[in-house]
Image (spheres, rainbow, N blue to C red):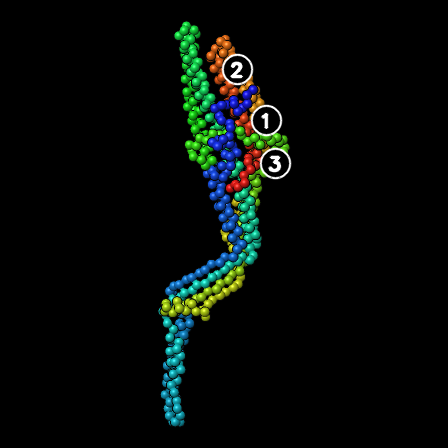
Amino acid sequence: MKTVAVLLSFIPLAVSARTLDLSLALEEATRKGPESEILRASEDSAKLMVREVRAVAFPKLSAYANAGLGHQVNTMGKLMEGLGGALGAYGQSIGGLDHRVGALEDSLRAPHGNSMGPLSAAKDALGTTSDDPYWSLGYGLQVTQPVFTFGKVTTALNMAKTQDRLTAIRLQGARNAIQGSVVDLYTTSILAKARLETTRRSMERQKAVVDQMQRNFQLGFGAKAQVLLAKSTLLRLTPDLLAGERDARVARKGLNRLLGRNPDDTTELDTTGLPALEARKVPSREELLKSTLSNRQDLKAMREAILLQEDYAKILRANNLPTIAAMGKFGFTAADQDMGNSAKNAFKWENREWSVGLGLQWNIFDGFEQSSKSGEVRAAVRQMQVREGDLRRMIEIEVDRAISDRIAADSSLAAAREGVAAATEARDWFSRNFANGSGQLSDLLQAEENQRLAELGLLAARLERTKTAARISLVQGQDLISISEAP
């Protein structure tokens, strides 16, 4: 039996500078493809999200500056003004006493003064307060640092770590999905091209049959019905040819997009597959199921998401408890009725202001907002736990299918190899008979057609084994190839 390398002469199997193998395609898609770019962007976004969550544990430093014009009721000035009026009335009530006291002093030749003098001076002093607006200017720095939050900060840091793990798990799962898509499109492209070439060869073979039957009919051999039947068979191949061209073109464009290549790239695809991966022994169901449940990314992501929601519920419950934070402030402030003086005084050291201390905030009643949100999160956790159990059952189904498909692929490959050997032997037999003059050309062409179909079946069986071997690795959440740098 001939080797597979010469069975399908229309598909070059030798790896050259213009040949792309599946391992290289997987690496290109993981490193340079558009999906890998999306992965890198999502990884950066996730890292920034983690940094945002961790920020709750760090102090908050802010600068402030304010300037404006304003007016406030001068309570002291109003009080003094009222007091001055009362003292003035009191002075008038004792004004008549001044004359009597003056007459007495005159009789005694003793110096005397005005009893209204002190009262008038006090009134004048108290009545000088201005009611004009003031220009105020202030600037400085202030810092706050959470001190005690009933576990909110610690829980937030735990959420950041969980989010970090969740990001890595999701990236691995997305990378596995990309690799699975590459394997599907790669094998589909090869098979579509091979089917297209087989259809073309079939049309050439059928055209030769029609020509032979027409010559035989013209020479008086055969029936016209046989000629018409052969022509109708040839015509039925035309839609198959058009569909094959479409399928080959669409599959290759999809593969080129996933690899980040030009859509019209026509680099030959090597049919070797993944020999190292295919050579691995098929694990037992128990071994495969145990490994899958331990390493499967979507199951890990579900567990981490449950932890994330549980921590979020803790924070919501803690929002109903007090929060204590340390606070500090240092700056300068000045106020004056003259704008220039206010600005000038704001830079003087004696106009500095500072404060340090502790602050407490306690939301005593919020209309049951936080408790309602906490209840919603707990309900979501219960839903995710149910989904986790359902996901485990789905994984068991995938494991069973992966093992069954791999066993079936191995059996199909063995049968396809025997089919190619039989078809090749039959073609050789008809070829010898035709060379000896005892065979018909139509029989030889039909034998060649059967050989091409057998070779196509062998290629399909080999590609199917590659896919099933890849599926067993992907179902366990493993990379198909070793990648040194991956997004």
Ranked by sequence position, the earlier of labels 1 and 2 is 1
Residue closest to the eye, 445 or 376: 445
Residue at coordinates 55% horizontally, 31% vertically from top-left? 274
Give the quadrant of the N terminus.
Answer: top right
Q: Residue at x 54, y 50 (%)?
A: 156
Above or below: residue 164 compared with residue 148: above
Q: Is residue 76 above or below residue 201?
A: below
Q: Residue at x 44, y 35 (%)?
A: 261
Residue 271 or residue 454, whichever sits in front: 271
The mark that comes first in sequence, 1 or 3, is 3
- Which residue is the extreme one toward the top? 220
Where does residue 420 sit, x and y in percent of width and height?
54, 20
> Which quadrant of the structure image shows residue 87?
bottom left
Q: Helix or strand or loop: what does disc 2 sit on?
A: helix
- Judging by the rendered image, the residue that carries numbered circle 3 is 291
Type of residue at label 2?
A: Asp
Q: Residues within 10 Å of mark 2 (few under 14, many from 20)?
A: some
Compared to residue 50, the image places residue 76 above or below, namely below
Q: Is residue 104 visible?
A: no
What's under tag 3, amino acid-wise? Ser
Q: Are marks 2 and 3 in contact (CB under 8 Å)?
A: no
Which comes sooner in the sequence, label 2 or label 3? 3
Query: Could you say where residue 208 lies in the image, as x and y percent from the top left?
Result: 43, 15
Label placed on residue 428: 2
Amino acid bearing label 1? Ile
Image location (x, y in percent) of residue 23: 52, 34
Q: Secondary structure at mark 3?
A: helix
Numbered tag placed on residue 407 in the rendering: 1
Q: Is 65 left or right of 6, judged from the image as shown?
A: left
